[in-house]
Structures are given as C-alpha cells and as structure tokens.
Amino acid sequence: MPDTPSSAKEILAYCESEDVRFIRLWFTDLLGQLKSFSINSSELEDAFEGGMGFDGSSITGFNPIEESDMIAMPDPSTFDLIPWRREEANKVARMFCDVRVPGGDPYEGDPRWIMRRALDRAKEMGFDDYNIGPELEFFYFKSAKPPNGVPEILDEGGYFDLTTLDAGSDVRRETILALEQLGIHVEYAHHEVGPSQHEVDMRYKGALSMSDDCMTYRITVKEYALKYGWHATFMPKPLQGENGSGMHVHQSLSRDGKNAFFDTDDQFFLSDTAKAFIAGQLKHAREISPLFAQWVNSYKRLVPGYEAPVYLAWSRRNRSALIRVPLYHPGKEGATRAELRCPDPACNPYLCFAGMLHAGLEGIEKGYELPEPMEQNLYHLTPEDRQRRGIEQLPETLGEAIELASESELMLRVLGEHTFTRFIEIKRKEWEDYRVQVTPYEIEQFLPIL
C-alpha cells in the first residue's frame, strides 16, 4: 500500500478518506495462534487512546477467569489493509496489538512483550537490533481433513521445479503479491523438495517486526490457498517418508549501524561477538528446543536423513550441522550471518526468536568458546564418532525436550516466571495426551501377533 499511514493521526485520516470500515486487532496466544477481534473505525480513536478491553481467560496461556481483564493496545506502525478484503466496498484493515493489563502495564504473558524484553537485553549490551531472515516452508493439500487420513498432495514436483509439476505456482504468486501489499518484501519463492511443498523467503529485518511478519505470512498463505479450495499447512511433518517443513533463520546483530558479526581479519570472517553468539546457541539448543520445535509432530521432522539438522555443531557449507555460516563474499560484509536450521514454521515466532536471541547473548555475556567447524556429513558419523568428538544431539521427543526446558534457567529468563509455568504445563499435557494414544501403526504391527 503506497504511503501507508503509520501514526494514529494519519490512520484516522486515512480510514475516513478511504472508507475503511473495520479494523481487525491482531495478537497471539502463548502457542502462536493468531487471535483477532474487529472494531468499527468509529471506535479507532478510543482504541489508540486507551486500548480495547477483552476477556483473556479463553486465550491459551493467558490469565485465569478471576484475572481475565486484558487490553489490546494497537501498534500504529503495523497498520495495513487486508489484501483479500480489498475489493469490498467497506475496506478492512489490521493492526498488531500489545497486550496490557488494567492500569496499562505490559501483560507478562504477551509473546510480543517477551520479544521486546529480549531486544531490551541486546540493547543493554550495546546492540542496535537483532536482524533475522526466516525461510518458512509449507505444504498445499487438497483438504484439511482427508477422507482416508493421509494428506492429498497436489503435485509431484521437486526442488526448484518450474513446470506443470508445480501446481501451486499461481497461488504462490498471488500470495507474494498480497504479502508485498502488506509491506513484506519477498526475496525468493520456489517449489521445495517434497511433493506439494513450497517456500517463500522474506527479506531480513528486526526481530519484532519479523515476528509480526511471520504471523502475517502464515495467515496470508492460508487465505490464498483457501481461495483455490486448498488447505495450506505449516505442520512440521505431515507426510511420512518425505522431508518436513523447516524454518531456517538467518541472523545477525548490529552495532552502531554495522554488522557486529563481521571481522575482516578472521579466517571465517566472523567477529568474536559472532563466535560467542553461535557458541551460545549451540550450548543452549537442547534446553530451548520447545521454543523452535514446539509440537509433538516437530520431533518427527528432527530425524537424520531428511535434511533436518539434529546434531549440535556448526559449519560453513555443511547443511547437516545445526548452524551454518554462509560463505563471505567481498563487499557483502553486511550479509555475514549465522543460519540456525532447526526451527520449524509452526512455532510461536515471538518466543522462538526471543529464545534464540537470549541463547546467543548468553554466549556473548559469558564468553563461550566456539568449537571448530564440522565440515563433513554428520549423518555419516557413528554414535561413537560423535561421542568422541563431543557432538550432542537435539532431544528426540517433545517429552524429553520439555523436561530439559523445565530445569533451564535460560528458559525461565526468556519467558518470565508466569509464562514459563504455563508453557511447561501446556506442553507436558500435550506430550501426555500423545504418549497414551494407541496408534494405527501399533494395531497393524502388533495386534495380529501378540
């Protein structure tokens, strides 16, 4: 949208002149599900002054009913028209909100506030911003509930295919145009390795804005799939025997307007800051894994053999390592970055990015030493080789991950006591509900012989 208004005064004038009738106020629950309620544009001035009240007791991870009063405070910088509602006579816009409690203080369980606190820590350590560029993968299927329980794919296309095998090229193009109307710059888009799997990559920006963009990206992908009668999913591993969907995250810190990760005199062109940051993420990856691999299904993706990294090592070219440092190109100092390859796109981006940042800052603050890079395929090493080299592995299940997280001081620092307690409680229940299921696999394999 050209000349997008970004202040309360500009937005009020724009809504009146352009006949914007409804404003959707967006925020997320603890698990990263987008929540929304609409207000009439005539209520917008009051919303900017004091926010809009709502009942938080039914929002996952928010306060119980006796403390349920919440306030959604719209962020004017996130105002945009909703592209899939632009053709209507009365236009619809959206704004992300910060959630507050009566009296105006930030609500400690608001994922956006958790991201802000992580950025405050970075600023206290002298950094301007935490810049990230995530690559979210997803699948298009014929329906959300296939009749036989197996998702119905739309094509047999493969990586970078641009033929009739790629059934999603038209809807992907419409999705990109809609994202650009929402102020999201798209760098790449292509068919991914799996059948009916796709990827759209956004240009890097600051972590809070990118968290908002990830939420916008997911709902936009789903809305345009629905226009075609399809279902888009960010489920990490929907197809057995095929690659799952990841969210590789390129990241760097800036200081005084420059990339704090670059050092021209280092053999890897990495500064001491970058090395300590990467070391921090490697050291704490196991305990923060429920933030980047949030669901039971996430750990079906994190297995050797499907391009998903599970071993705690870093490299420059080796994509089997947890963190990859892309090769430096002269004149591109600003592009020096570390790519964390373990997150998946179904996470809560605010919590995921906040946890990644805290882990890296922990490494800088405590002076962690970065081990030597592992340039060979880690999947080809035997367990004994990995043990001898001190290479650890990510948790294999959500149950293992959540117990590690429950004892982590870093997780407590990331989430704060209130959110930490609720998150652990919710995820333990998810694991317990899954653990006691009797699956079709067990019936098929064991009922005839036991």
Image (cartoon, rainbow, N blue to C red):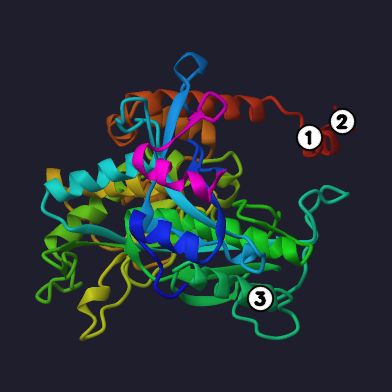
The reply, left or right, for residue 203 in relation to residue 243 is: left
Q: Earlier in the sequence, mark 2 or mark 1?
A: 1
Q: Pointer 3: residues within 10 angstroms few (<14), some, or many (20+)?
A: some
Q: Are marks 2 and 1 in contact (CB under 8 Å)?
A: yes
Q: Nearer the viewer, mark 3 or mark 2?
A: 3
| Quadrant into which the C terminus falls | top right
Q: Pointer 1: residues within 10 angstroms few (<14), some, or many (20+)?
A: few
Q: Earlier in the sequence, mark 1 or mark 3?
A: 3
Instruction: Residue 168: give x, y in percent of width and height.
Output: 70, 73
Residue denoted by label 2: 447
Element at badge 2? loop
Relative to 94, say whether 63 is above or below: above
Q: Is residue 425 magenta?
A: no
Instruction: Residue 40: give x, y in percent of width and height.
Output: 55, 47
Image mark for residue 152: none
Image mark for residue 158: 3
Instruction: Residue 334: give x, y in percent of width and height.
Output: 23, 75
Which residue does the image show at 63% across and 74% down from the upper left?
A: 174
- Three-letter residue code for mark 1: Glu
- Residue 177 appearing in the image: yes
Residue denoted by label 1: 442
